[in-house]
């Protein structure tokens, strides 16, 4: 199953990502979250820590800068 939920325009600094992650399971019923895919707006240490604490696998795209290349 693929579920697509929109959190926001903007980035995680301007929204309550923790509340979003807590409320998402209620939208899915008995289905477990196997993988959280997100864009560069979620590139935040707090997001990574929350997903790790909840044992949710994640794939977050980030902006590639010269330093990363």
Image (cartoon, rainbow, N blue to C red):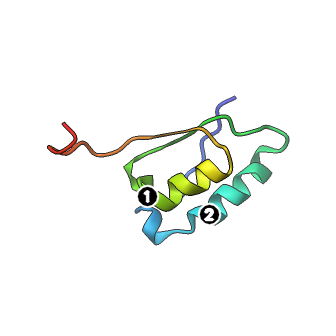
Residue on which disc 1 sits: 44
The earlier-in-sequence mark between 1 and 2 is 2
Question: What residue sits 45% from the left and 71% below the top?
Answer: 14
> Is 46 situated above or below 36?
below
Q: CA distance from mark 1 to mark 2?
A: 12 Å
> Is 42 situated above or below 19?
above
Q: Is residue 13 left or right of residue 6?
A: left
Question: What residue sits 70% from the left and 39% below the top?
Answer: 33
Q: Secondary structure at mark 2?
A: helix
Q: Looking at the image, can residue 8 be seen?
A: no
Q: Position of residue 43 (x, y in %)?
A: 41, 53
Within 10 Å of the Cα at label 2, are there few (<14), some (14-19), or many (20+) other Cα atoms?
few
> Is 21 situated above or below 55?
below
Question: What residue sits 24% from the left and 42% below the top?
Answer: 64
Q: Secondary structure at mark 1?
A: loop
Q: Is residue 15 left or right of residue 27?
A: left
Q: Quadrant of residue 20?
A: bottom right
Q: Quadrant of residue 18?
A: bottom right
Q: Position of residue 63 (x, y in %)?
A: 28, 46
Residue 18, which numbered label? 2
Within 10 Å of the Cα at label 1, are there few (<14), some (14-19), or many (20+) other Cα atoms?
few
Q: Position of residue 8 (x, y in %)?
A: 49, 60
């Amino acid at each position: 199953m693929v579920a697509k939920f929109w959190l926001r325009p903007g980035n995680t600094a301007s929204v309550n990502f923790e509340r979003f992650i807590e409320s998402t399971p209620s939208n899915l019923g008995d289905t477990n979250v196997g993988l959280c895919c997100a864009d560069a707006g979620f590139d935040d240490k707090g997001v990574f820590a929350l997903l790790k604490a909840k044992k949710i696998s994640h794939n977050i795209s980030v902006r590639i800068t010269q330093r990363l290349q």
